[in-house]
Image (cartoon, helix red, strand yellow):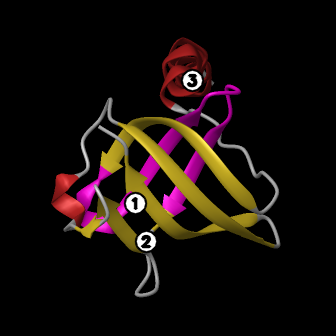
Amino acid sequence: MKNYKAILALLFMLMPFMYACQQGTDVVESGTYQGTVDEVEAAKTEIYVKTDDNKRLELYFNENTTLTRNGETVQFDQLQKGQKVEVEVNKVGQRLEPVAVRILE
């Protein structure tokens, strides 16, 4: 019984930490949005973008996603946290497919 109480106490202590680490994402309608790169997951070719209207978009790049800067195609490693971007997305069910990402700065 003591182990059960200890485990529960530990879970309650960890809950705020787990909640703080979990940042939700939003699904928006297909379209074009501007915002700031909030996080880059290079190993997954994934970025999170905080839009100007305070939405957080989770975007997994695929073979059809274009990434450009000043009209020229660039590699994924050019993306950095804090950059201003414009993203064109298609809503597919409850996920977003990035069609194009344009680095604005």
Image position, residue 2 (x, y; %)? 56, 19
Residue 53: say if magenta: yes
Identify the residue at image location x=57%, y=14%.
16
- Please count the marks in the image: 3
Query: Could you tell me which secondary element the residue under label 3 belongs to?
Result: helix
Please give left or right for residue 66 compared with residue 26 in the image: left
Q: What's under tag 1, amino acid-wise?
A: Glu
Mark 2 and mark 3: Cα distance apart in space = 35 Å
Helix, strand or loop at label 2? It is loop
Query: Which numbered disc covers residue 11?
Result: 3
For residue 46, the mark is 1
Q: Position of residue 26 (x, y in %)?
A: 72, 44
Give the quadrant of residue 1: top right
Give SS at disc 1. strand
Q: Which residues are magenta?
A: 41-59
Asked if residue 42 lies left or right of residue 87, the reply is left
Give how far apart the Cα atoms at labels 1 and 3 are: 30 Å
